[in-house]
Amino acid sequence: MLIHGYVKNDEDRAEIMEIFNAQVQKIKFEKLNFTEKLWYFKAHVWKNQLLQEYKYTLKYAFHMGGFIS
C-alpha cells in the first residue's frame, strides 16, 4: 500500500481497499495480544490517511488511544 501513496482517483482507492481487506480478513481480533492490537489500529489509521478519509483516521486513532489507556 505504501508504494502507491495517497489516493489520486477511484482506481487507486479500490486497489488500496482490495489489498487492505484481503489482509485484514485473516485477522481474529480477539486472539491478538496487546502489541498486535495496537498495530491493528495503526494499520487502520494509516489506511484512512492514504484514502484521505480523515473522519475515520480520527475514529481509529481514538480507538487506539482508548485501548492504550
Image (cartoon, rainbow, N blue to C red):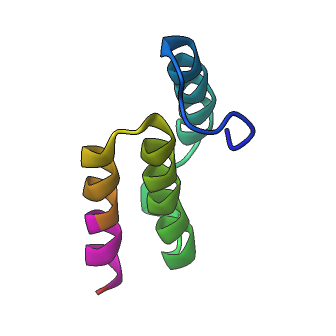
The percent coordinates of residue 17 (x first, y second) are 52, 27
Asked if 14 appears above or below 57 in the picture, the reply is above
Q: Residue furthest right?
A: 3
Residue placed at 53% from the left, 29% from the top? 7
Asked if 37 appears above or below 10 in the picture, the reply is below
Determine the main secondary structure of the stretch shown in magenta.
helix
Residue placed at 42% from the left, 43% from the top? 48
Q: Which residues are magenta?
A: 62-68
**Rendered image quadrant of residue 51:** top left
**Rendered image quadrant of residue 23:** top right
Left or right: 53, with 16 as reference point:
left
The C terminus - image quarter: bottom left
The percent coordinates of residue 37 (x first, y second) are 48, 66
| Residue 65 covered by magenta stretch | yes
| Residue 10 covered by magenta stretch | no
Residue placed at 51% from the left, 52% from the top? 46
Q: Residue furthest front?
A: 8
Q: Residue furthest bottom?
A: 69
State the residue in front, 12 or 61: 12
The percent coordinates of residue 33 (x first, y second) are 53, 73
The percent coordinates of residue 30 (x first, y second) are 42, 60
The N terminus - image quarter: top right
